[in-house]
Image (spheres, helix red, strand yellow):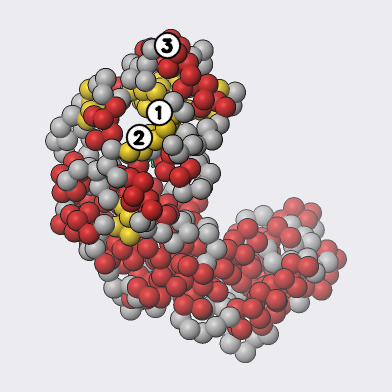
């Protein structure tokens, strides 16, 4: 019998449920990950106990999704989702089951689960229960639907993207019938909310095989969820994703850049914004992704004849230190995937390292004078002040040695505002 080393808290939860006369098992991702020798992110429990019974048995619980049978049991600072065996009602809109009903049958509960490898349960008394050949599929590295794939994707099209996501996270293939059904039912993805779609794509991009994002195009799913990437160069995108840092904005910037380049866009276009808006990105990730795509498209700031060190400072100024390392990773990935190698990017990295080590000023924040200093010296506040500070920063970007209070005040004194137009 296969043995899984359950964490003490999970053992305790299973024991309390079982000694109170209910069935209880660890279920889903945690069992799958243990069998793969991976550390599960979280532990879920499936039980014959009804939500109110679960609440009665444990002192600290949260009603996470009580309508769907889920109660979170808190032990110390950890939460464990305990869900009552359930059967999903009819899906009328391809989004949510109209209703769920609780059942006393574990088998019924397992039938509603998406893939064979996610329909495994375990407890110490019964060992693994594997109704649909999940262990064999784990051994063969296969993602296969529980039941008839067309029906399962028709019920909930998000499962199509979950198949892609698990294939990327686990490095598995999607079994043929499952694959064909996913392609066939791709239009159903139009019913899935942007948030759920984004979560799955994020997980795919952040996985160990982010290049599996190619499956979206290979299966024609991109037409429904983001047609902008249809023309992206797939082999460029795969290589770039696989050599890049595992950071969400970097990876999304690669997707958007590949989309823009594939569409022949050399200047920033609405294409990236369309993707980011449709998928309801948070502002921080959106801004960073846009910054990266725009910056690579406009090239290293400064004139072609200008010293690389000055241009590197201009680049850091544009990006901010907080984004610089990620941008360099993005740039390096693009360069490798284009077959241009790393020499140029390494040169830039070295320059930027030097700027960091020498603590050279690359932003208004680091300038040796601020607006208050200028006002004290008789400058008027307002837009002119901002222009003067920008002028001083420009001087300092060209020559960092000028970043001294007195010197800058002197320069500011002789600064003549250009005629406003
Ligand atoms: P992860 O490691 O990402 O948490 P997971 O397999 O635990 O992977 P969850 O989204 O946490 O995935 O879901 C827990 C379990 O619930 C799954 O293993 C699966 O059995 C079931 N499940 C989740 N989403 C669906 C769905 N859309 N359709 C059917 N079953 C699902
Ligand atoms: Mg999980």
Of the two numbered discs 2 and 3 on the same chain, state the one appearing first in sequence.
3
- Residue 51 seen from this side: no
Residue occupied by mark 3: 20
Q: Residue at x 15, y 49 (%)?
A: 150
Q: Secondary structure at mark 2?
A: strand
Residue appearing at x 23%, y 29% in the figure: 108
Residue linked to disc 2: 129
Asked if the beta carbon under badge 2 is closer than 8 A to the nearest atom of ligand 1, the reply is: no
What is the quadrant of residue 272 in the picture? bottom left
Marks 2 and 3 sit apart, C-alpha to C-alpha, by 21 Å
The CA distance from mark 2 to mark 1 is: 7 Å
Horizontal side of 173 relative to 288 (left or right) equals: left
User: Which mark's residue is nearer the viewer, 2 or 3?
Assistant: 2
Q: Residues within 10 Å of mark 2 (few under 14, many from 20)?
A: some
Closer to the observer: label 1 or label 3? 1
Along the line of sight, which residue is nearer the eye, 50 or 307? 50
Residue lying at the far bottom in this picture: please name it: 305
Q: Secondary structure at mark 1?
A: loop
Does 186 sit above or below residue 88? below
Callout 1 touching callout 3 (CB < 8 Å): no
From the top left corner, tell me how far across and down residue 54 is, in percent: 41, 15
Point out residue 235 in the picture as x, y percentages from the top left corner: 38, 75
Judge by depth and name the residue closer to the eye, 87 or 24: 24
Residue drawn at point x = 70 percent, y = 57 percent: 365
Q: Which residue is mark 1?
A: 126
Q: Are marks 2 and 1 in contact (CB under 8 Å)?
A: yes
């Amino acid at each position: 019998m296969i043995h899984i080393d359950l964490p003490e808290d999970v053992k305790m939860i299973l024991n309390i449920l079982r000694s109170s006369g209910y069935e209880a098992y660890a279920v889903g991702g945690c069992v799958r990950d243990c069998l793969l020798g991976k550390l599960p992110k979280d532990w879920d429990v499936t039980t014959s106990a009804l939500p109110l019974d679960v609440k009665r048995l444990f002192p600290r619980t949260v009603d996470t999704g009580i309508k769907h049978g889920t109660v979170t049991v808190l032990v110390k600072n950890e939460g464990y989702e305990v869900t009552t065996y359930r059967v999903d009602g009819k899906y009328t809109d391809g989004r949510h089951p109209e209703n769920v009903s609780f059942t006393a049958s574990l088998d019924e509960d397992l039938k509603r689960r998406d893939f064979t490898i996610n329909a495994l349960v375990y407890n110490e008394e019964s060992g693994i229960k594997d109704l649909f050949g999940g262990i064999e599929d784990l051994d063969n590295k296969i993602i296969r639907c529980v039941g008839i794939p067309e029906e399962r994707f028709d019920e909930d099209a998000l499962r199509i993207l979950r198949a892609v996501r698990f294939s990327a996270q686990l490095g598995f293939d999607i079994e043929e019938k499952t694959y064909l059904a996913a392609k066939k039912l791709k239009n159903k993805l139009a019913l899935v909310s942007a948030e759920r779609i984004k979560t799955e794509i994020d997980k795919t991009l952040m996985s160990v095989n982010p290049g599996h994002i190619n499956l979206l195009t290979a299966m024609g799913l991109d037409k429904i969820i983001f047609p902008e990437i249809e023309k992206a160069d797939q082999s460029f995108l795969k290589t770039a994703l696989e050599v890049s840092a595992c950071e969400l904005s970097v990876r999304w910037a690669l997707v958007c850049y590949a989309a823009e380049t594939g569409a022949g866009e050399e200047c920033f276009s609405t294409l990236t914004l369309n993707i980011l808006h449709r998928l309801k990105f948070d502002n921080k990730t959106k801004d960073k992704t846009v910054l990266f795509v725009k910056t690579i498209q406009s090239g290293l700031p400064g004139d072609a004849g200008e010293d690389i060190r000055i241009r590197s400072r201009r680049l850091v100024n544009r990006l901010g230190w907080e984004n610089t390392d990620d941008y360099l990773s993005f740039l390096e990935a693009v360069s490798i995937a284009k077959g241009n190698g790393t020499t140029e990017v390494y040169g830039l990295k070295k320059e930027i390292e030097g700027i960091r080590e020498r603590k050279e000023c690359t932003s208004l924040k680091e300038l040796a004078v601020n607006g208050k200093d200028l006002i004290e010296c008789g400058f008027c506040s307002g837009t002119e002040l901002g222009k003067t500070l920008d002028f001083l920063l420009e001087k300092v970007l060209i020559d960092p040695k000028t970043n001294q209070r007195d010197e800058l005040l002197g320069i500011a004194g002789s600064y003549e505002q250009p005629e406003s137009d």
